[in-house]
Image: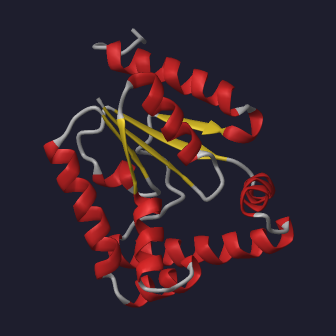
Amino acid sequence: MKITIGGLPGSGTSTLARRLSRKFNLIVVSTGDTFRKLAAEHNMSLEEFGHLAEKDQDIDKQLDKQQQKIAQQRNNIIFEGRLTGHFIEDATTRIWLKAPIEVRAARIAHRERLTTAQTITEIRTREECEASRYKNYYQLNINDLAIYDIILDTARYTPEQTTRIISEAVQNHKQSTTPPWP
């Protein structure tokens, strides 16, 4: 089983990845965690490193190639990151989580002890930076969700409910061998 989980900042991708990892006994590979580690290694903030990645496409391309290599070598894994659904070609289930920016900002602000207003500004800057890079480097529109098997608005559900809904869908998707409609 190979699951990809994508979504915009604060949509709940990391939380869902951890929960599904425990439920299905899967390893999690997080692009965001790797990107944050690289930013720290360069003594840069996430925003600063994002701007560097706008100028140096090798940063994103290396991250993506690293995930593809892992996907070729392993099964029983969850890939968590904005573009994983596009790059893990043999994913069994592709998930996209969404939520309004105010909800996502409140989650991040709470977690990082910031104001929601400040967080909204940071999210917008980050999303614009990423969308520009994805379009320039890969000709991808991050807002085109056609590749995803499951799209869920996490503002409507608790983390427990989200996990239950997605778990059920993953189980059914994994077990299904024929389309459910005649």
Q: How far across and how far down the image is residue 81, in percent? A: 44, 55
Q: How far across and how far down the image is residue 74, in percent? A: 19, 40
Q: In this view, does 24 lie above or below 114?
A: above
Where is residue 120, by image quadrant? bottom right
Residue pictured at 14% horizontal, 44% vertical: 73
Depth check: give the residue in front, 141 or 117: 117
Depth check: give the residue in front, 38 or 134: 38
Q: Is residue 174 left or right of residue 36?
A: left
Residue pictured at 85% horizontal, 70% vertical: 117
Q: Is residue 11 left or right of residue 81?
A: right
Quadrant (top left, top right, bottom left, bottom right) of the C terminus:
top left
Depth check: give the residue in front, 177 or 71: 71
Where is residue 25, by image quadrant? top left
The residue most toward the top is: 182
Q: How far across and how far down the image is residue 66, in percent? A: 24, 61
Where is residue 159, by image quadrant? top right
Residue pictured at 44% horizontal, 34% vertical: 149
Q: Is residue 147 above or below residue 130?
A: above
Q: Is residue 70 left or right of residue 31?
A: left
Total numbered labels placed on residues in the image = 0
Residue pictured at 79% horizontal, 56% vertical: 110
Depth check: give the residue in front, 66 or 182: 66
Q: Is residue 113 above or below residue 54?
A: above
Quadrant (top left, top right, bottom left, bottom right) of the N terminus:
top left
